[in-house]
Amino acid sequence: LLAVTCCDPRVLPDRFFGGIGMKFSEVRNAGGRASEALRSIICVDQMLGVGAVIVIHHTDCGLTHLRNDYLHKSLTEKAPKNAEEIAEMEFGEIVDLKASVVEDMKILKDSPYLRKNLKVYGYVYDIKTGKLQEVKE
């Protein structure tokens, strides 16, 4: 099992899986986005074999508050010489939590670098209640 989650310290995969004695790998990044996690998933799958990947996004995620256009503007002000490169950057903003989980599940299922029989599941974690809600495609 490999969990892709946000690096937010309020999201602790050990709480989801550790309590039931399950061993798992995890890849954490801003927003828990699959596009950024893909390289790590490929490596772990090649080395250890991954039975399933679980994508977990969460309520009150920073990427539900930050927009690409704001980050582009902010970074361009800091590094105007890099404006062209900055304009191409994608920060994985999240407008709709369930839709972002479905999008990330699709990225993994459609990747030519991962096994076609790799199981991919998606969840939204509610920060306030501590509950996981499954997201179906």
Image (cartoon, rainbow, N blue to C red):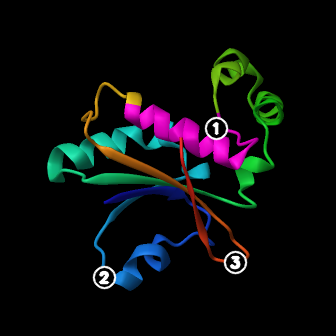
How far apart are labels 2 and 3 at the CA level? Answer: 22 Å
Mark 1: few/some/many CA within 10 Å (<14, 14-19, 20+): some
Viewer-nearest of discs 1 and 3 = 3
Alpha-carbon span between mark 2 and mark 1: 32 Å
Dot 1 or dot 3: first in sequence order is 1
Left or right position of 10 against 25: right
Question: Where does label 2 land, which residue?
Answer: 21
Marks 2/3 in contact by CB < 8 Å: the verdict is no
In the picture, measured across the screen, residue 72 lies left or right of residue 134, that is right
Q: Which residue is drawn at 25% across and 43% down?
A: 43
Q: Are marks 1 and 3 in contact (CB under 8 Å)?
A: no
Q: What is the distance, in whole Å, between disc 1 and disc 3 at their CAs?
A: 25 Å
* Image coords of residue 109 (percent x, y): 39, 34
Task: Please state the extent of the stretch shown in magenta in the rendering.
Answer: 91-109
Q: What residue type is labelled 2?
A: Gly
Dot in front, 2 or 1:
2
Majority secondary structure of magenta residues: helix
Name the kind of residue labelled 3 in the image. Thr
The percent coordinates of residue 53 (x first, y second) are 37, 51
Label 1 amino acid? Gly
In the image, residue 14 sits, relative to residue 100, either above or below, namely: below
Residue 130: mark? none
> Which residue does the image show at 61% across and 73% down from the upper left?
131
Q: Which secondary structure lies at badge 1? A: loop
Instruction: Locate residue 94: give its quadrant.
Output: top right
Q: Residue 129, which numbered label?
A: 3
